[in-house]
Image (cartoon, rainbow, N blue to C red):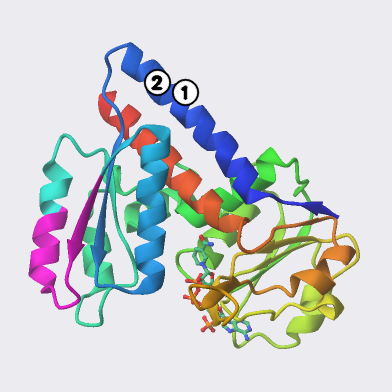
């Protein structure tokens, strides 16, 4: 078993990005600038956005955090999106999801200029992904692809099962892994809560990717000997032994599954850091595209 160490791989990417920033500084060129809009005080969202801002600082990107109260009206948020769209100093920006119920997430996502949509959630970027045209790939699936690429995971001709069909992880990842690319060329099955015989399906997988948010759902009896396992799930579970009172638990029962696998990503330290790294790569790309 080999650990798919997302923390180490992301650190390598961040070092490459930091070197690129340094080179741009020396040439007197613009430094990438990422903005993030955060609405409310949800613990998960606050910590994701904080990690993204910290990553910008570590690499040398500029960052701007814009915070709104939980009750912010939709039109105020839309106005902010429009102003970021035309702000020349901002190369890319994200609106951290989920948003409060009174705000239409799709409306907000569609209002973002696709050229600044570094989360890759805009329909135009998703459409470009399907057609294999240039654009921004959604950060988490792109991070998973990069994790596979940098760890030389063979994907061609493999049977890949993805658990979870969300618009931000499972569905785009199923498209990316089925494309004629490397990584890619997998035969993909996209499973969800209505899928029958899920255990038997998982046992057929050469590559099993779990993105459902059900702690310890994937057990050893669901895994083929030698499979590659990627755990996207992150659920906060109460833990009185931790100072903060909780810990992050993945969708895979790591201890019993790991010995059967060829590669496995841990939680934390697997897909999470890769999501941030791919957001940073998208931001640099947004700035370079704008410069062209
Ligand atoms: P989501 O919107 O929470 O949807 C969950 C998906 O899992 C749905 O497609 C659902 O099926 C499916 N599902 C739920 N229970 C299932 C079951 N028992 N069997 C089979 N499928 C089941 O998905 P998400 O936003 O992609 O999040 C999934 C997990 O990934 C969460 O833990 C989230 O925190 C984590 N995540 C991590 C990162 C990261 O960077 N590490 C990024 C994004 C998400 P239906 O469609 O039928 O309801």
Residue that carries the numbered disc 2 in the rendered image: 22
Q: Magenta residues?
A: 64-81
Left or right side of 46 for 209:
right
Label annotation for residue 170:
none
Vertical comparison of 149 with 258: above or below? above
Q: Position of residue 114 (x, y in %)?
A: 28, 48
**177 is higher (above) or lower (below) than 216:** above
Q: Which residue is pictured at 68% across the width and 49% down the height?
A: 5
Q: Give residue 138's quadrant in the image.
A: bottom left
Question: Could you tell me residue 74's position as x and y percent?
Answer: 13, 72
Q: Secondary structure at mark 2?
A: helix
Identify the image quadrant of the N terminus.
Answer: bottom right
Determine whether the beta carbon of the residue marked 2 sits less than 8 angstroms from the nearest atom of ligand 1: no
Mark 1 falls on what kind of element?
Answer: helix
**Front-lying residue, 133 or 194:** 194
Q: Are marks 1 and 2 in contact (CB under 8 Å)?
A: yes
Q: Residues within 10 Å of mark 1 (few under 14, many from 20)?
A: some
Judge from the rendering whether residue 187 lies leftward or rightward of residue 28; answer left or right: right
Q: How many marks?
A: 2
Q: Residue at x 49, y 44 (%)?
A: 277
Answer whether residue 213 is visible to the viewer in this image.
Answer: yes
In space, the residues marked 1 and 2 are separated at their CA atoms by 5 Å
Specify whether residue 70 is painted magenta. yes
The picture places residue 203, in percent across and down from the top left corner, at: 83, 74
Q: Is residue 234 magenta?
A: no
User: Where is mark 1, residue-wise?
Assistant: 19
Visible residue check, residue 179: no
Q: Residue at x 54, y 57 (%)?
A: 272
Split into 4 quadrants, where in the image is the C terminus?
top left
Image quadrant where residue 173 sits: bottom right
Describe residue 161's horizontal placement relative to residue 14 as left or right.
Answer: right
Mark 1 lies within 8 Å of ligand 1 (Cβ measured): no
């Amino acid at each position: 078993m080999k650990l798919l160490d997302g923390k180490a791989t992301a650190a390598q990417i961040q070092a490459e990005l930091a070197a690129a920033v340094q080179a741009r500084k020396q040439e007197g060129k613009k430094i990438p600038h990422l903005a993030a809009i955060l609405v409310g005080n949800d613990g998960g969202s606050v910590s994701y956005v904080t990690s993204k801002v910290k990553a910008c600082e570590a690499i040398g990107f500029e960052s701007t955090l814009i915070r709104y109260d939980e009750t912010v009206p939709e039109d105020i948020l839309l106005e902010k999106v429009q102003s970021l769209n035309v702000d020349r100093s901002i190369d890319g920006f994200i609106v951290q999801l989920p948003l409060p119920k009174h705000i239409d997430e799709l409306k907000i996502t569609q209002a973002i200029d696709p050229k600044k949509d570094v989360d890759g959630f805009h329909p135009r970027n998703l459409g470009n992904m399907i057609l294999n045209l240039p654009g921004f790939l959604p950060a988490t699936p792109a991070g998973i692809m990069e994790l596979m690429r940098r760890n030389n995971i063979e994907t061609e001709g493999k049977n890949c099962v993805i658990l979870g069909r969300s618009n931000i992880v499972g569905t785009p990842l199923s498209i990316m892994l089925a494309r004629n690319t490397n990584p890619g060329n997998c035969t993909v099955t996209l499973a969800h809560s209505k899928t029958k015989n899920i255990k038997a399906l998982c046992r057929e997988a050469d590559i099993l990717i779990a993105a459902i948010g059900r702690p310890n759902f994937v057990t050893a009896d669901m895994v083929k000997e030698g499979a590659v396992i990627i755990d996207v799930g992150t659920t906060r579970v109460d833990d009185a032994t931790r100072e903060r009172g909780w810990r992050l638990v993945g969708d895979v029962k790591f201890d019993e599954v790991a010995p059967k696998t060829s590669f496995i990503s841990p939680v934390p330290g697997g897909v999470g850091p890769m999501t941030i790294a791919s957001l940073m790569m998208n931001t640099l790309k947004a700035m370079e595209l704008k410069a062209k």
